[in-house]
Image (cartoon, rainbow, N blue to C red):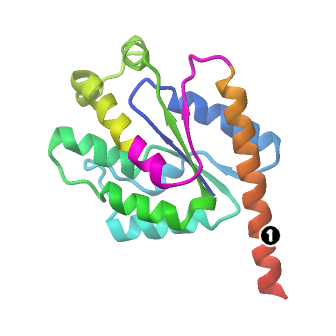
Amino acid sequence: MIIYFEGVDGSGKSTLLQQISLMLKKENYEVIEDGNKLIPTHPKSENRISEENLYKELHRMAKSPKIYLLDRGPISDDVYRQFDKLPPVTRLVSIIDFVRLHNNSIFTIYCRTEKAEEYMRQRGDDNPVALKNHRAISEIYDIVMARYADQVKNVRVYDFTKTGEFTNLMSAIKIFCYKGVERYEQTNDEVRA
């Protein structure tokens, strides 16, 4: 299974990932915190993944009983490549098609807060693209993630500055993970029978 975190710099993705990881480990799930390292999409990565291998790896993760936490991935690659004019590994339409095929195995969290740029600057980020284009990147994310959420299941918008959102999100994730493991065990029982 995959829990996929998206959002602009400073939106709380990394902090939320750590909190979810701790909660899932307490529930005795096998969690892979750095699943995004298995799908390096950044153009400066020396082992940047191909589109074909990206989807093979995502398919493997989605079908696994382990929970892979992805701090960004192909959607970020598509958004940020609009600013450095480099080609993305894949396009949004292909990402949507893939996620629709794996709707019950992928939970997407769009981290979004009006204070993201302020938090990014406070923590001293040095990403020149994000520093220069933060507002434009946020606007593109809003458009891309609205289209994405319109066409796939299990998408939540999360704003860490709003009271109560964390508890609601954690409840939804617990249900998603429980059902996912149950489906996996059921499928394996059928294969063994």
Picture quadrant of residue 27: top right
SS at mark 1 in the image: helix
Q: Could you tell me residue 144's position as x and y percent? A: 35, 43
Q: Could you tell me residue 68's position as x and y percent? A: 60, 53
Q: Is residue 154 visible?
A: yes
Q: Is residue 159 magenta?
A: yes
Q: Residues within 10 Å of mark 1 (few under 14, many from 20)?
A: few
Report the side of 112 relative to 138 (left or right): right
Q: Could you tell me residue 1's position as x and y percent? A: 63, 58
Instruction: Name the residue at 26% across, 22% down.
Output: 131
Picture quadrant of residue 102: bottom right
Position of the C terminus by quadrant: bottom right
Residue 137 vs 65, above or below: the answer is above
Instruction: Name the residue at 17% across, 40% down.
Output: 84
Instruction: Name the residue at 54% across, 24% down.
Output: 159
Amino acid on which disc 1 is placed: Glu
Report the side of 146 relative to 177 (left or right): left
Report the side of 139 relative to 158 (left or right): left
Q: Label 1: which residue?
A: 185
Q: Could you tell me residue 176's position as x and y percent? A: 71, 51
**Viewer-proximal residue among 146 and 58:** 146
Q: In the image, which residues are magenta?
A: 146-163
